Amino acid sequence: MNLSFKLLSMGAVLTLGLTACGAKDDAAHEVAEESVVEETGAVETANSEAALAAALASDMRPDEDKADDAARKPGAVIAFAGIAPGMSVFEMEAGSGYYTEIISHIVGPEGSVIMQNPESFDAFLGDAVPKRLADDRLANVRHTKSNFDNLDAEDASADVVTWILGPHEMYFTPSDGVTLGEVGPTYDEVFRVLKPGGSFVVLDHKAAPGSPETTGGTLHRIDPDIVKGLAASAGFVLVEESDVLANAEDDYSMSVFDPKVRRNTDRFLHKYAKPE
């Protein structure tokens, strides 16, 4: 065997050895990275669960809020939404702030909450919001008043946008002609406000399948497929649904305010994502 061939053979063996070592190192590195990701995810989940439990049990929460927990199941809803410490949350149609209170405690001082209501809701809400926010008791919350198609937030600024018991409101037609905004542009606004990869969480009273949009203004219910279609048109992707608030005994022909079904309606819960 000549010298050149020997050198080539040795080089090939050395290259194969180095390649094998490199492959082992890469595999070990990938395993280590996966382990770190899993451990980090587990810690984040534990932190979120602890923050949620602390928020629900907080002495700061009004007693009337806690009395609503059995019907509203905020723990399950917020866990589904994935709200965690440090997040920025935009809360559409926050009402008097039942969920605002809980979310504020969860996201903590490193997070923020924008609590939005249409200005026309003032007459209905009375002094509930000022009382909720009095003396800076929820220091990370900013209250805004706007229609749904003109949200007061920067582009791509929210980790999560929630709209709880709200989409059906778009079809309410008050006698004084007050509008809450245009339907399509409202979903476009949510898309604008969310960060890429952010979540849009929607909860509302179910209407019978195939019900027209007008059911939102009469029975205060909406067919979930209407919301799915509007969200998809705005660019969202449906990633998860929950039946935590489902009730097969609900009567879809009744207004949600009828005493026979009030606070016990069949409610859908969706999570949509803004693509990255």
Image (tube, rainbow, N blue to C red):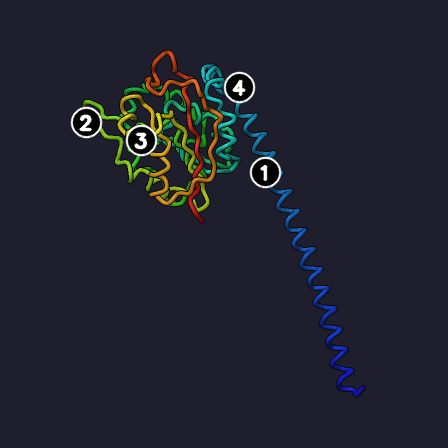
Mark pair 1, 3: CA separation: 33 Å
Q: Is residue 236 above or below residue 73?
A: below
Residue 39, position in %: x, y?
Answer: 64, 42
Left or right? Give the position of 177 relative to 147: left
- Residue at x 21% of width, y 27% of height: 178
Q: Earlier in the sequence, mark 1 or mark 2?
A: 1
User: Which is closer to the viewer, label 1 or label 4?
Assistant: 1
Separation (CA) of disc 2 from disc 3: 18 Å
Residue labelled with disc 2: 177
Q: Is residue 77 above or below residue 264?
A: below
Residue in the foreground of this view, choosing between 134 and 179: 179
Residue at numbered disc 4: 59
Of residue 223 and residue 145, the one placed in the foreground of this image is: 223
Q: Earlier in the sequence, mark 2 or mark 3?
A: 3
What's the CA distance linking mark 1 and mark 2?
A: 47 Å
* Amino acid bearing label 4: Asp
State the image quarter where residue 215 is shown.
top left
Residue at the farthest left position: 176
Which one is in front in this view, the residue at disc 2 or the one at disc 4?
2
Kindly state the secondary structure of the residue where label 3 is placed.
strand
Amino acid residing under circle 3:
Lys
The residue depicted at 22 percent of the width and 24 percent of the height is 174
**Separation (CA) of disc 1 from disc 4:** 24 Å
